[in-house]
Every structure is written in C-alpha cells, then in structure tokens.
Amino acid sequence: MASAFGARDPLLGVTTAGSRIVAVGLRGHIVYSDDVGRSWAQAKVPVETDLVSVCFSTPNLGWAVGHGGVVLRSLDGGKSWTRQFSGQQLNELAIRYFERRRGEAGAPHADNSKSGGSAKPDESVPSLLDVWFDSPTKGTIVGTFNTIFRTEDGGMTWIPWMDRIDNPEKLHFYSVKGSGNTLYIAGEKGNVWRFDPRSQRWVSVPTGYAGTLFGLIVDGPKVVAFGMRGSCFLSEDAGKSWAPVATQRKAGITAGLRLADGEIVLADQTGGFVQSRDGGRTFTPLGRDTRIPVFSLAQAPGGQVFSVGTLGVAAQTLR
C-alpha cells in the first residue's frame, strides 16, 4: 500500500538506475529518488511480499527478487513493476525443464546423481536472495535450497541451472556477483563457486571458512567475500586461493561496495563501517557505529553513498 513514509520502512536492497536511486524492502515496498535522496516516491508494485535484492541492467530495465520466489521486472527505471514469476511457477518451470532433459538421450548433466541429487527441484517455495545482470540480456537469480535460474534473453525465458553446480547439501545461496564475463556465487559453509564458461558449470572455489558468506565484491580477478562474525576473505587470482582479512568487526558483515575511486566499504549488523584503500588487503574503521543494521549499499553517480536497513534508506558520510 502507498505510504508517505515508504523510505523509512525496513529496506533490504538498494541500487542505482542511471541517476535514480531505487530501494526495495519488506511487504513489497519499493521507493526511488531522482534528487540524490532529498525526496522519495513509492513505486507501483503488484505484491506485498518481502523483496530482498534489486538490480538494473540499463537505466530503465530492472529486476527485483524476494521471498516466495517472486521475480519482478521494471521497464521504466523502477517507477512501476510487473510480476514475472512466483515461487510455485518457478518450481513448475524447473520440474518441466528437468523432465524434458531426462527425455533427451545423452543430455549432459541431466543425471541428478552427478551432483549428489542437488539438481532435483525442491517442492517447497524458494526464497530468492539475490539477482545480478552482467549485461542487458544475461542475468542470474539465486536463493535458498540450491536455487539458480539464468536468462540470456533479457528475462523472456529463465532456465534452471541447479544441475550445473555441485551442492549435494542444497546449501543456500546468498549472493551472485560478476565482473565482465566472470560470475561468482557465495553461500553457506564458506562456499564460493565460479562459473566456468567452457564446461558451463559452477566450479567450487571454497574459502576454507565454515560459516555463512552473505556477499561478494568482484573486480576482475579480485574477489572479496564477507559474512558471519566479521569474516572477510580476499582472492586476487579469481578464487584459486584465499586469504583471511581482519576487519576488526565481530558482527556479521551484511553489505559491501566498491566505490568509484576503488575503495571498498563494508557494513555490518550493528551499523559499523570499515574501509579498504588497498583492494581489500586491509580494513580500518570508518566513523562511529550507527547501531542500525545495514543490509545493502549503493553509490549515486555524484559519489554519495546510501545504505538501507531497518529504518529505511539513509545517506552516509564516509569521509
């Protein structure tokens, strides 16, 4: 429902659509600002489901995903949205896809046993936790219980990719991010996977950590993975090797962003911020804790950084 206080409601994801700032959150709230956060308008949204992540592949074409397997699309920069899928529809899509694959003689990766049974769609409705488009046409959504879907035609069709990853425990995927043609997924038990274009499969590049990883920052061969209890890991060789990085934080790190000048900023569940000026090798505290959990970060074209959390969207002074 429309509310004059939409930008103050709990929000979980934020991004930019050209010069516009767009944030998504609980009960289907989506708000946007065209004046660098001075005022906010509420978008027209067809659902009241919690939305977790938002991404724009062009200033006009955007996607939002969330609980109940909801996939939304916007064609006008986030002002209005239409529903493409619900969780039940995604399940049915996956079931039809794998039934068809089993009927194809010699189809690669059609045998679920090759991935420990993880390719079999879960009958429960998945929650979608992240969306990433590496071009206007190519995008990936991930979520709970080994959920992965991929589009290569701008969202006209979505293909289940659950059979292209070795995840026999059906661990949750919390983040999908990329740089150029390189894509990564991060999830539970310190797991990171990199997509291999040659085999068309996700290759495990584990960090050695046992806890959950909530997010990724990808910059060419450099990858920063962050998660529970202030944990952070850096790879400078596309995930082949990882080094733990001290963040001086004890709470879970739930948001990360590479700024336009190359600095990296991380934020946690206590509203604490740390920054790195050396590509993620070291981090130093940044200001005082706000005590307001931060779930996502975005930088406007002019350089202003915005965070979203339990009290909505806020501009951050990081200098």
Image: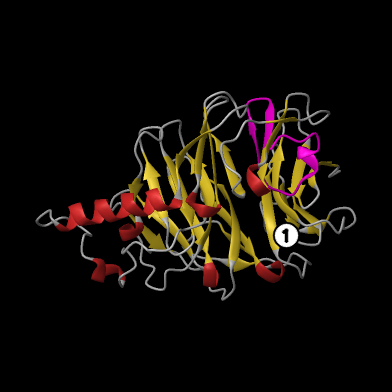
Position of 112 with respect to 309 (left or right) is left
Which of 241 and 141 lies nearest the eye of the viewer?
141
Q: Which residue is mark 1?
A: 282
Would residue 45 be seen by someone viewing this image from the given angle? yes
Which residue is the extreme one toward the right?
288
Q: Residues within 10 Å of mark 1 (few under 14, many from 20)?
A: some
Which image quarter holds the N terminus?
Answer: top right
The residue lying at 41 percent from left, 52 percent from top is 88
Where residue 113 appears, as percent x and y from the top left, is 24, 71
Task: State how the image is colored.
Answer: secondary structure
The quarter of the picture where the C terminus appears is top right
Where does residue 167 sit, x and y in percent of width and height? 39, 68
Residue 24 included in the magenta stretch of the image: no
Report x, y in % for residue 166: 36, 66
309 in relation to 110, above or below:
above
Q: Is residue 6 magenta?
A: yes
* 86 versus 187 height, above or below: above
Residue at point 81% right, 62% down? 270
Region in magenta: 1-22
